[in-house]
Image (cartoon, rainbow, N blue to C red):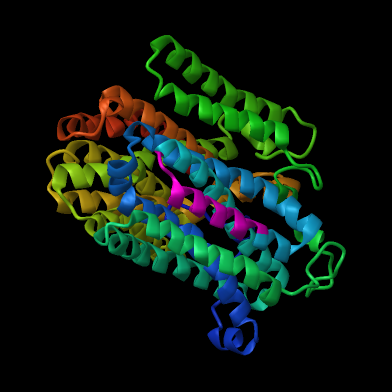
């Protein structure tokens, strides 16, 4: 699926990226009799896709009401952490209990998170809701893509993935609009109730719309058991084994880095930050030291390999650009007096640029991949530098242009990176390689948001939100990540040279 709203393609699509896309046959889709079921699964995608842009539109009102500007980086970090855990767990969950139960559990987790956020008296409570929302939303996305493989005939997969891309695009448009309406009504809590009710309704409807035969031990439409179609990559480990220890190390590491940004004790902040970084390396070491069941492909051990450079590129570029999603909404409203609706659409331009570029370049011949990958990575770096220069003084139209460029850069190289990575590893690790791209992207967003929060608080947000501190923060939350982006571009150039 074309990535919009800062989410990567599914393992199911990525694993087939190396084959030419079939020409969509929309008549076959309409005649298949499964369109209603697919639309239902798409509603789960809608909840996850619209979430970030809703928050981007409302976050200034939320902070103004319950405070917590110093915890802004945690907002996205914990949401992404929940998505990471759900993405690793859902394949195993579906293998045990079936698609219907997996979808319903994810929707209920999302609804519970919305309820906590809607009732939150302080940002600390809302963060618990955001963690639950991330777990539920990440689970809904994982279920939807696994369900495409298990519920629908292979002949209509291209049409279904195209429609999922359209759902992400519609979400990028409607998310800010809905958030703006609740902001104008001065009822930000209503937005969480609005989505929470939808999620609860989806959980109940799952027992009507998703077929009952898709449970453990029952055959699917292709005559195989439900667990048969789940690769170790989708499970996050060897079949039947949940990677609890590795994910626990990663979760604690992200939280440690995020906490280092809000403590007033400099020594404690340094210790927590260093411990968090050490934990990330420990996560990699534990994963790669396993004899089997890796979360990441074993080819990343080889220095200079396509696999290592691809994942380094994705990690660095994703982590370096998350500041725009986390702090862009607040900075645009405080420094440029944009309305909530206008702010939401400026943030949405990144997603729109990603989608347009990915669709426009999807059928480019292989001999142009090198130029496309390098150009896309360079555009991301240019956009990040542009934000550092223009976020304080504007003009807003130039900020909008850089938002489009940043998204377009990712959209240009995303599918080609997946294909090169998948083809660069051994046959038995291709599913793992395909799944590792969105996983690494989410890890990068979580860690990047935590570090961005540390930078913003060090630049002044720890003392509260004001126009003066916003001007300082607006520079450093982008400048601090330029070296990281340069590493990502360098890795992209090395990877594309092979």
Residue drawn at x 18%, y 37% is 389
In depth, the one of 282 and 470 nearer the eye is 470
In the image, residue 119 lies in the stretch drawn in magenta: yes
Q: Is residue 386 above or below residue 344?
A: above
Q: Outermost residue toward the right?
A: 217
Q: Is residue 353 left or right of residue 221?
A: left
Q: Nearer the viewer, residue 450 or 304?
A: 450
Q: Quadrant of residue 439?
A: top right
Examine the rendered structure and indicate whether residue 460 appears above or below residue 377. Answer: above
State the predominant SS element of the stretch in magenta.
Answer: helix
Q: Residue 274 location, x and y as percent?
A: 50, 17
Measured from the top left, where is residue 64 in percent x and y?
27, 42
Judge from the rendering whether residue 169 lies leftward or rightward of residue 58; answer left or right. Answer: right
Bounds of the magenta segment: 105-122
Give yes or no for residue 51 being in the magenta stretch. Answer: no
Depth check, front residue: 395 or 408 = 395
- Quadrant in the rendering for residue 436: top right
Residue positioned 59% across, 81% down in the render: 35
* Location of residue 180 in the rendering, given as x and y in whole percent from the top left corner: 28, 61
Q: How many marks?
A: 0
Which residue does the image show at 40% across and 39% down from the upper left?
122
Q: Is residue 343 visible?
A: yes
Horizontal side of 142 relative to 266 (left or right) equals right
- Quadrant of the image occupied by residue 263: top left
Residue that appears at 43% across and 16% down? 269
Q: Position of residue 365 (x, y in %)?
A: 47, 62
């Amino acid at each position: 699926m074309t990535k919009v709203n800062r989410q990567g393609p599914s393992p199911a699509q990525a694993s087939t990226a190396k084959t030419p896309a079939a020409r969509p046959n929309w008549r076959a889709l309409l005649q298949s009799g499964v369109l209603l079921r697919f639309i239902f699964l798409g509603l789960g995608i809608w909840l996850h896709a619209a979430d970030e842009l809703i928050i981007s539109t409302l976050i200034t009102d939320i902070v103004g009401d319950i405070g917590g500007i110093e915890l802004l980086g945690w907002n996205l970090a914990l949401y992404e952490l929940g998505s990471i855990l759900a993405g690793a767990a859902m394949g195993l969950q579906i293998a045990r209990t079936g698609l219907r139960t997996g979808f319903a559990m994810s929707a209920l987790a999302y609804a519970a998170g919305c309820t906590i956020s809607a009732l939150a008296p302080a940002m600390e409570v809302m963060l618990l809701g955001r963690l639950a929302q991330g777990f539920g939303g990440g689970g809904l996305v994982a279920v939807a893509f696994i369900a495409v493989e298990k519920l629908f005939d292979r002949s209509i997969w291209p049409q279904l993935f195209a429609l999922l891309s359209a759902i992400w695009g519609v979400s990028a448009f409607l998310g800010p609009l809905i958030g703006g309406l609740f902001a104008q009504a001065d009822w930000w809590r209503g937005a969480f109730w609005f989505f929470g009710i939808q999620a609860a309704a989806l959980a109940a409807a799952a027992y009507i719309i998703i077929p009952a035969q898709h449970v453990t031990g029952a055959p699917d439409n292709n005559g195989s058991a439900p667990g048969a179609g789940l690769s170790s990559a989708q499970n996050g480990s060897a079949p039947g084994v949940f990677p609890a220890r590795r994910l626990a190390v990663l979760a604690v590491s992200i939280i440690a880095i995020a906490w280092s940004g809000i403590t007033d004790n400099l020594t404690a902040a340094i210790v927590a930050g260093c411990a968090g970084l050490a934990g990330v390396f420990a996560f990699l070491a534990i994963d790669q030291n396993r004899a089997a069941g890796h979360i990441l492909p074993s080819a990343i051990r080889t220095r200079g390999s396509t696999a290592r450079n691809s994942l380094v590129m994705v990690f660095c570029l994703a982590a370096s650009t998350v500041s725009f999603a986390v702090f862009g909404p607040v900075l645009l409203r405080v420094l440029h007096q944009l309305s909530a609706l206008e702010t939401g659409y400026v943030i949405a331009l990144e997603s729109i640029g990603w989608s347009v570029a990915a669709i426009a370049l999807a059928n480019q011949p292989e001999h142009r991949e090198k130029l496309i990958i390098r150009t896309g990575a360079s555009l991301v770096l240019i956009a990040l530098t542009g934000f550092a220069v223009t976020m304080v003084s504007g003009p807003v139209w130039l900020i909008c242009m850089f938002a489009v460029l940043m998204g377009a850069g990712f959209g240009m190289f995303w599918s080609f990176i997946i294909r090169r990575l998948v083809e660069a590893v051994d046959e038995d690790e291709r599913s793992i390689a395909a799944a590792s791209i969105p996983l690494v992207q989410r890890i990068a967003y979580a860690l990047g948001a935590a570090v961005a929060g540390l930078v913003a608080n060090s630049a002044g947000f720890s003392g509260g939100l004001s126009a003066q501190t916003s001007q300082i923060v607006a520079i450093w939350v982008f400048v601090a990540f330029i070296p990281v982006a340069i590493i990502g571009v360098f890795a992209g150039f090395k990877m594309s040279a092979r």
